[in-house]
Amino acid sequence: GESVGLHLPTLSVQEGDNSIINCAYSNSASDYFIWYKQESGKGPQFIIDIRSNMDKRQGQRVTVLLNKTVKHLSLQIAATQPGDSAVYFCAEGSLKAAGNKLTFGGGTRVLVKP
Amino acid sequence: EAQVTQNPRYLITVTGKKLTVTCSQNMNHEYMSWYRQDPGLGLRQIYYSMNVEVTDKGDVPEGYKVSRKEKRNFPLILESPSPNQTSLYFCASSRVWGEKLFFGSGTQLSVL
């Protein structure tokens, strides 16, 4: 399949444990943040998003935390499953500024060990 | 089924031979966008469209054209492809900018 990234940081996690994936964003004007999951040979799949007026948002088995002070975003996956093995990307954007685009991070590969 | 459909899935071509990658969405989305994905560089936006007949450049628009004559379609055109355009391309759409972005399955392009 396609190579998403040859030298991605990798997080190895035991099945059933919790995973934490971190992301530093660059633009202090960004007010919209998203996490995507990409499996081999597939397009990115939306996981969860958060706007800058929040610092935490929960979904099904996932939680996103936003720390605007240090421009840091994290994704927590509870009870990690084999199907969670993928590359995870954070993305940032601005809902107010011109240029309606998402800027993606480089990605983190998550490997779930049985 | 709600989806973003890209064609072709794989394409091998030669330098200078014009090509079009099609993208269609069936969700009546206003916002559509093209990205390329390269190892070590991640996903970078090529062009986007806020609605019919409204398009604008992203971060890496050189060598590409787009059109948005209909709401559902957003083709990516390479008038004279070059080897540095060898990449994995994704089309994406959302109801409006700032909402959940749906991605297609990708087009792997090789320019020889």
Image (cartoon, grey):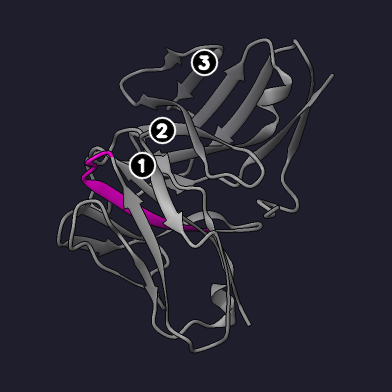
* Picture coordinates of residue B88, whole percent (x, y): 56, 60
Q: In 3D space, how far apart are the residues under numbered discs 1 and 3 (Cα atoms)?
A: 19 Å
Amino acid type of the residue that numbered disc 1 sits on in the rendered structure: Gly
* Picture coordinates of residue B59, whole percent (x, y): 40, 62
Q: Which of marks 1 and 2 is nearer the N terminus?
A: 2
Q: In 3D space, how far apart are the residues under numbered discs 1 and 2 (Cα atoms)?
A: 6 Å
Q: In which quarter of the image is the C terminus of chain B?
A: bottom right
**A89 on left or right of A55:** right
**B85 on left or right of A32:** right
Residue A63's tag is 3
Tell me which residue sits at (55%, 25%) in the image. Answer: A74
Badge 2 marks a residue whose secondary structure is: strand
Question: Is residue A102 a member of the stretch shown in magenta?
Answer: no
Q: Mark 3 lies on which chain?
A: A
Q: Which chain carries label 1?
A: A
- Residue occupying the far bottom of the picture: B16
- Mark 1 packing: few (<14 Cα in 10 Å), some, or many (20+)? many
Residue A33's tag is 2
* Location of residue B84 by image quarter: bottom right
> From what the image shows, is residue A72 above or below residue B74?
above
Tell me which residue sits at (25%, 63%) in the image. Answer: B56
Amino acid type of the residue that numbered disc 3 sits on in the rendered structure: Thr
- Residue occupying the far front of the picture: B1
Nearest the camera: B35 or A100?
Answer: B35
Q: In 3D space, how far apart are the residues under numbered discs 3 and 2 (Cα atoms)?
A: 13 Å
Q: Earlier in the sequence, mark 3 or mark 2?
A: 2
- Region of the chain picked out in magenta, as a range: B27-36
Amino acid type of the residue that numbered disc 2 sits on in the rendered structure: Phe
Question: Do callouts 1 and 3 mark residues in contact (Cβ within 8 Å)?
Answer: no
Question: Is residue B31 a member of the stretch shown in magenta?
Answer: yes
Where is mark 1, residue-wise? A93
**A77 on left or right of B45:** right
